[in-house]
Image (cartoon, rainbow, N blue to C red):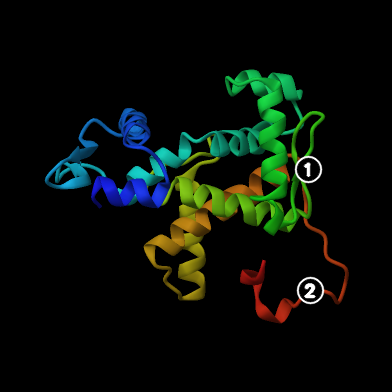
Amino acid sequence: FTLTEVKKELGSSDKTIRKITERLNKQMPADISILISRGKGIYLQRDGRSKTISEVISSIFRQTIYYRLMNLLFTSGGKHSLEEIAELLFMSASSLKKLIVQLNNNDLKPYKLQITYSAPRVKGNELNIRYFYWKLYENAYKFTGWPFQNISFEYIQQLITSIESQQNIVYFINSKRRLTFLVAIILQRAAKGYFVTFEEGNYPWEEGSSHI
């Protein structure tokens, strides 16, 4: 894109775009940077041996206040007061309240979830919570990395490999990684006492366990 095109698309000034670019570059790996050139416009420059664009985007996503808050609520939701969480995120309590209102009204609404204000935690249907966090961590760790410190990635991979062998099936690499994340989320939620209950006759078991 040319600088003019970006200014028009974002409705921002030349100065603002350059400031945004500077902030983004601080979050980029050393071998990747966003450059602004009169002849080339705005473009991403990276070393051929550096991370892929998807990995860079995932890395930036993990540094957003949105991800940091939701990850904190997953690992220790309900254990801290709003003021304590605000301190952990290096922001004011009033700013955190505004962020929670915004998330409740926008990002979490499609999942029918809410963040509570007193001792903040994610509240809603347990299946929806698991699905939300599955998508969150999938976006944050698409190809590399593992956010679950108390759960072994290798152990879950071995379990899935055993299922493949027993059922005579083979998962694609990306599908197997995604399934590993889902299992980890289920285990961590269950360890904290959160379970999914089904009324007899109301679950389509004939569709298989993948329906979950």
Residue 65 in the image: above or below residue 93: below
Identity, as a three-letter code, of the amino acid under mark 1 = Gly
- For label 2, the residue is 203
Which residue is located at x 66 percent, y 22 percent? 86
Q: As drawn, is 9 to the left or to the right of 124?
A: left
Give the image location of residue 141, x and y in percent: 44, 46
Q: Nearer the viewer, residue 72 or 199?
A: 72
Which residue is located at x 65 percent, y 71 percent? 211
Which residue is located at x 59 percent, y 37 percent? 71
- For label 1, the residue is 193
Q: Which mark sits nearer the N-terminus, 1 or 2?
A: 1
Identity, as a three-letter code, of the amino acid under mark 2 = Tyr
Label 2 secondary element: loop
* The C terminus sits in image quarter: bottom right
Give the image location of residue 181, x and y in percent: 53, 51
Give the image location of residue 127, x and y in percent: 72, 58
The Cα–Cα distance between marks 1 and 2, rounded to whole angstroms, is: 21 Å
Residue 78 in the image: above or below residue 57: above
Which residue is located at x 72 percent, y 20 percent? 83
Q: Quadrant of residue 51?
A: top left
Question: Is residue 143 among the parts visible in the rendering?
Answer: no
Question: Is residue 187 among the parts visible in the rendering?
Answer: yes
Q: As drawn, is 187 to the left or to the right of 146?
A: right
Label 1 secondary element: loop
